[in-house]
Image (cartoon, rainbow, N blue to C red):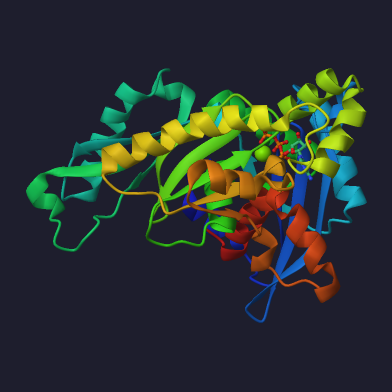
């Protein structure tokens, strides 16, 4: 379903209608409702609800809840955030999807190209293709002079999501009384909401609760992606152990202090693990493509950590920005600073709502 862009168009209906982005993260659900008014993108409402308390754990911890528990949380969130629309776009966790950039034989005829891609994709998808939804993007040639036909090869980003995952999400969305016109791997939503650089390669670090998604974006295409199984909940756990405080207290301390003061545990130790793995991805990209990555975008709840951008600048010695997805929306001026400070957590939901607004 997520691949059918024409279907999404069909659902787009009225341009002035309110739309919703629904991000089902491992530690919390986020929603963002937008509406287009005279060509401007207006933020109507947003909200977040932690999953932990719905499964007997603390806020900020990643959970493995049943569809029923997630439906219950989502319904509560829609009510609390006073969401007024049912039409939404929904994120697919990166952990449940497969993204791979491959070089395939070029065919001039689009139908033949499609057949080639579908056949070749079997080699890269580790389960029978009947069990997944397949999608792909043909990477545009870098310079007009680069003649694809002559080279006889095209670069294709193959994307696969297991049917079971889609069914699970569809079940949740229907259970909460919503109607989704598309499901999109969270990486693409984040790029739409948080990556400004149109040409040069940029590395995104989405520091979630359970994991950190790291990927390189070049001209809107995901050139490389990798999941690091360390996230912000590991910082909470580290603080809890070394400071001998509860998880709930550690979560508060983490948000208060960030990397500013290190007297409770060592968040820096956890971040250095994340960054050293991210660094390997960065180097791998730079070597393979013979290009340097010019900046890093920090996003996800962990991206909000105080002083993290300064620390990242030191580690990577390149430009580091914290994502500000709400900057793409219009909101009352007095809300700007709040929206800026919570923005990274909402990048996926904003990106989904932005796509829904465009009706694609
Ligand atoms: N101000 C803050 N400072 C530090 N950490 C924070 C802050 N706000 C949120 N976090 C942490 O960010 C994490 C949640 O981030 P996010 O909402 O992006 O994760 P998620 O989408 O639920 O998880 P995942 O992406 O792994 O599925 C939590 O562990 C939370 O403690
Ligand atoms: Mg997330």
Extreme residue toward the left, this view: 150
* Residue shown at the point (65%, 51%) measured from the top left: 347
Camera-side residue of 3 and 159: 159
> Does residue 71 appear left or right of residue 210 in this picture?
right
Q: Position of residue 326 (x, y in %)?
A: 70, 62
Q: Quadrant of residue 51?
A: top right
Q: Position of residue 247 (x, y in %)?
A: 88, 24
* Residue shown at the point (82%, 32%) measured from the top left: 263
Q: Position of residue 27 (x, y in %)?
A: 76, 32
Camera-side residue of 33 and 26: 26
* Residue shown at the point (72%, 25%) measured from the top left: 234
Residue 17 visible in the snapshot: no
> Does residue 52 appear left or right of residue 163 in this picture?
right
Q: Position of residue 281 (x, y in %)?
A: 43, 34
* Residue shown at the point (67%, 45%) measured from the top left: 308
> Does residue 304 appear left or right of residue 251 in this picture?
left
Residue 246 visible in the snapshot: yes
């Amino acid at each position: 379903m997520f691949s059918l862009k024409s279907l999404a168009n069909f659902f787009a209906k009225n341009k002035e209608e309110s739309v919703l982005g629904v991000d089902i993260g491992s530690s919390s659900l986020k929603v963002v409702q937008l509406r287009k008014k005279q060509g401007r993108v207006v933020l109507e409402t947003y909200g977040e609800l932690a999953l932990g308390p719905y499964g007997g754990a603390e806020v900020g911890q990643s959970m493995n809840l049943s569809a029923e528990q997630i439906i219950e949380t989502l319904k509560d969130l829609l009510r609390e955030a006073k969401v007024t629309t049912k039409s939404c776009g929904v994120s697919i966790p990166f952990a449940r999807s497969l993204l791979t950039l491959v070089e395939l034989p070029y065919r001039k005829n689009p139908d033949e190209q499609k057949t080639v891609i579908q056949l070749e994709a079997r080699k890269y998808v580790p389960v029978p293709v009947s069990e997944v939804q397949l999608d792909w993007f043909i990477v545009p040639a870098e310079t007009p002079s680069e003649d694809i036909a002559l080279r006889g090869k095209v670069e294709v980003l193959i994307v696969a999501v297991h049917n079971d995952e889609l069914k699970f999400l569809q079940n949740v969305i229907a259970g909460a009384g919503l109607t989704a016109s598309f499901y999109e791997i969270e990486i693409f939503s984040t790029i739409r909401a948080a990556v400004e650089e149109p040409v040069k390669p940029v590395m995104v670090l989405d520091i979630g609760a359970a994991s950190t998604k790291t990927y390189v974006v070049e001209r809107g295409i995901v050139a490389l992606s990798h999941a690091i199984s360390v996230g912000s909940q590991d910082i909470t756990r580290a603080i809890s152990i070394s400071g001998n405080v509860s998880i709930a207290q550690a979560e508060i301390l983490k948000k208060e202090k960030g990397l500013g003061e290190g007297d409770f545990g060592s968040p820096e130790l956890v971040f250095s693990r994340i960054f050293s793995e991210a660094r390997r991805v960065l180097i791998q990209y730079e070597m393979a493509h013979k290009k340097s990555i010019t900046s890093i975008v920090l996003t996800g709840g962990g991206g909000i950590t105080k002083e993290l951008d300064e620390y990242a600048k030191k580690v990577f010695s390149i430009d580091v920005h914290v994502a500000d997805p709400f900057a793409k929306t219009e909101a009352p001026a007095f809300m700007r600073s709040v929206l800026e400070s919570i923005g990274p957590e909402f990048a996926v939901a904003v990106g989904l709502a932005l796509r829904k607004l465009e009706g694609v």
